[in-house]
Image (spheres, helix red, strand yellow):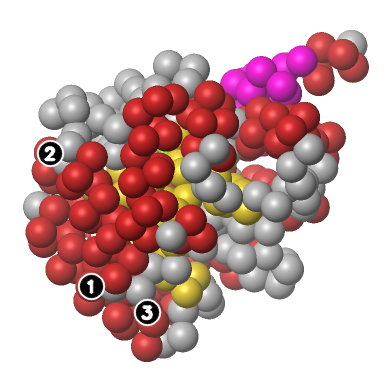
Amino acid sequence: MIRITEVGPRDGLQNEPGRVATAVKIALIEDLAGAGLRRIEAGAFVSPKWVPQMEDSAAVLAATRHLPVALPVLVPNLQGLEAARAAGAEEIALFLAASESFSRKNINCSIAESLERAREVGAAALAAGLRVRGYLSCVLGCPYEGEVPPARVIDLASRLAALGCFEVSLGDTIGVGTARKAKRLAADAVAALGADRVAVHFHDTYGQALANVLACLDVGIASIDASVAGLGGCPYAKGASGNLATEDLVYMLDGLGIDSGVSLSLLAAAGRRICDALGRRPASKVAQALAAKEH
Ligand code: HMG
Ligand code: MG
């Protein structure tokens, strides 16, 4: 069984040029839960000055909390943790970068400062009984610095695990990674943290996301992030295109005989509905093929 963390409502929508109505976000999460996804990242309690698209995360969470799914939310600092708790969040995600320049651009502090913050926020969240996930971005390359040393990635991932993250998601934020490098990094992370504590998070900028996932399955990775319709991008990673599309991932897993618990047809319908609302076509090749078959 593979665990999928659906990140569309957060990673997918955080980069939208226009405002997405709260009701549209709520309907998206309901559709995704209906398709069988069990972990759906619902929003981010970050500064609305930095990412205005996530400003309504409390309202989104309030309207979806009754669903039988985990609804993690991103939290950058104690202020965000307080707001997330007040909104009823039961799981948060801390996020650090493996590159100094990206850390500055994304959260306005150095890696060392971000670790200190993560330690503080993680401890407070765990003491309050929340589950804590960790994200590390730019693990296979940085939009400002280029190459990122794998040893630094493993060190930071280990630190996130040590401060109580049940799982650390390794993010190829700009989608530059290729299969051999991705597999080597995943293998090192599995050796350092254990297979059950490593997730992978690929963006599909260069069309490598699915190949990278397949390579990582070989080294025991069983937790994968994906975004319905391939929505997404990071506001602080210029040129980064969407995430690995959940439809593409589920189609591949189905073909490999690996259970993900997700209905591809319901998922594709969820993707079509959000894309209709956004006025665009799903980026997922599988979604496009299924739509073409229906016409
Ligand atoms: P700062 O400007 O250094 O912070 O930002 P500050 O403490 O000086 O606060 C500035 C203002 O923001 C203040 O308001 C605070 O109250 C407010 P003012 O006094 O000016 O009116 N503020 C907040 N408001 C609401 N919630 C909060 C909060 N914190 C401060 N939590 C900060 C530092 C970290 C806040 C900012 O840089 C930030 O919010 N960054 C978030 C950026 C972000 O969300 N990026 C996208 C997610 S990461 C990602 O996509 C990668 C990932 O997907 C993995 C991958 O793809 O690889 C995870
Ligand atoms: Mg991402």
Q: Would you say residue 233 sits in the magenta stretch? A: no
Q: What's the residue at 64%, 23% (across, down)?
A: 284
Residue projecting furthest to the right? 294
Q: Can residue 47 be seen in the rendering of this structure?
A: no
Secondary structure under tag 3 reads: helix
Q: What's the residue at 40%, 44% (across, down)?
A: 187
Where is residue 134 shown, x and y percent of the image?
Answer: 37, 60
Precedes in sequence: disc 1 or disc 3: 1
Q: CA distance from mark 1 to mark 3?
A: 10 Å
In this rendering, position of residue 230 left or right of residue 53? right
Q: Which secondary structure type mostly characterizes the magenta part of the structure?
A: helix
User: Which mark, residue 214?
Assistant: none
User: Which mark, residue 101?
Assistant: 2
Q: Nearer the viewer, residue 31 or 27?
A: 31
Q: Amino acid at mark 1?
A: Arg
User: Which mark, residue 125?
Assistant: 3
Q: Can residue 169 be seen in the rendering of this structure?
A: yes
Residue 184 vertical position relative to residue 177 in the rendered view, above or below: below
The residue indicated by pointer 1 is: 119
Q: What's the residue at 71%, 36% (across, down)?
A: 253
Q: Nearer the viewer, residue 76 or 218?
A: 218
Name the quadrant containing residue 100.
top left
In this rendering, position of residue 49 left or right of residue 189? left
Precedes in sequence: disc 3 or disc 2: 2
> Are discs 1 and 2 less than 8 Å apart at CB?
no
> Are discs 3 and 2 less than 8 Å apart at CB?
no
Q: Which residues are magenta?
A: 274-289
Q: What's the residue at 31%, 49% (across, down)?
A: 136
Q: Amino acid at mark 2?
A: Ser
In this rendering, position of residue 176 left or right of residue 200? left
